[in-house]
Each structure stands twice: as C-alpha cells, then as structure tokens.
Image: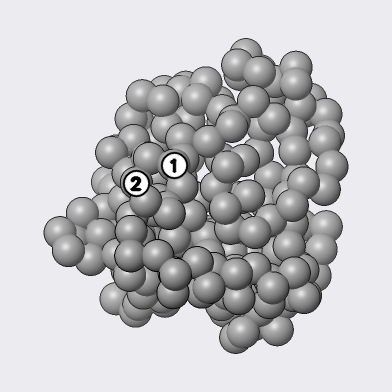
Amino acid sequence: MDVYLETERMVLREFTADDLELIVALDGEPGVKRYIDNDAPVDRDELTERLEWWLGYDGRTVGYGFWAAFERSTGTFLGWFHLRPDEDAGPLEPELGYRLHRAAWGRGFATEGSLALIDHAFSALDAERVCASTMAVNIGSRRVMEKAGMCFVRAFGIDWMDDVPGQEEGGVEYAIGRGEWSMHRTSIRGDQDSSTETEGARSSEA
C-alpha cells in the first residue's frame, strides 16, 4: 500500500480493493452523510463501483485522487480525503474534499489533512487554485475551509438533492490561490513558532 502523504498525526495512503468494508462502515455511520443524502441507507453495490473508480483515478490524472486516512498513533481508519480536478476545471484547479468518522470530528483532523493537501497541490502538482464546496448550513465544514486559508467565493443553488436538511439554503464554494497560500502558510508557521499550545490552535469540524 503506497503512502501518499503523512502529516503530524495522519497517514494518507492509496485505497485498495480490501478497503470496501471501511467505506461501508463510514457511510453507514449516522450523521456522517447528513448533508450528502440525509443518511440514506448504504448501497454496497454503489460503494463497490465507487471504490473501483477511486482505484483507477490516479491513472487518469497523475498525482490526484482519493486516499484513506489513518491515525498514525493507533492505525485507526479516520475516513478519506480527495484532491482532484473538478469536472469543469483543468488539473491546475483541483477540488479538495473529505469525509471522516464522527469520532474524528472536533479534533482538527480535517483541517490538518486539508492543509497538507493544499500545500502538496501548490508545491508538488503546480496547481494555481484549490477549491472546495459544501452546503451553506454545514458550518463545521465551512470552518475547516476557513482554517485552511480558503476564502468564500460564491453561493449556488442546489437542485439535485432530495430531503436533505438545509438544501433550500444552497451550497457555497471556497478557494485559495497560490499567492494567498504562500501568505497563509507563512502565517501558520509564525503562529506555531509563537505558541506552545499546538492542540489549542486546531479547528473543530463536523
């Protein structure tokens, strides 16, 4: 299993065909997909096809894809992250995404992974802009994006969801460019150098 990135507390590695049960359990956990499909029952056949698509993603766009996230100290599966070009954009404008178990919420993992992937996009993949989107009412996810240095870009309507709480409020897009990231990264390092309470600086997410 190939490791894609390591952070202070996580290992992000490529998915394998043996990881199906991990994503079945993740999608089946109450609350995890509240803002995706209102926690609809898990469809194993659909997840099997999704995993197969994930496994072949790197071959379509080198350097981008979907990765399983594990806690370094315990080996616990936390969830997954993705960094990939949006359907309407080229490889220089990837989209960031993540889905984590509830036990990982509020512990800064989503922010930590997002920061690492954004930095990788600009430093190793020559990206010019990284974007992310969520439902407007998903305050936890929006806070993660803000902590990662991303700024609000636009609001948009959602007409492809049914019976999802807050769908009438629509979605929001956040993004950060290469120049903005350079300044944000400098700011983060300055904060770390001036503080001994590293855990206190981490964001919470939902």
The residue depicted at 36 percent of the width and 24 percent of the height is: 30
Residue furthest to the front in view is 194
Residue furthest to the left in view is 74
Whether residue 19 is visible here, answered yes or no, is no
Q: Name the residue under label 1.
A: 204
Give 166 or 202, whichever is nearer the viewer: 202
Q: Are marks 1 and 2 in contact (CB under 8 Å)?
A: yes
Q: What amino acid type is highlighted by mark number 2?
A: Arg
- Counting from the top left corner in percent of width and height, residue 69 is at 35, 59
- Counting from the top left corner in percent of width and height, residue 181 is at 68, 71
Q: Name the residue under label 2.
A: 107
**Element marked by disc 1:** loop
106 relative to 180, above or below: above
185 relative to 157, above or below: below
Asked whether, in this view, residue 44 is left or right of residue 72, the answer is: right
168 relative to 93, above or below: above
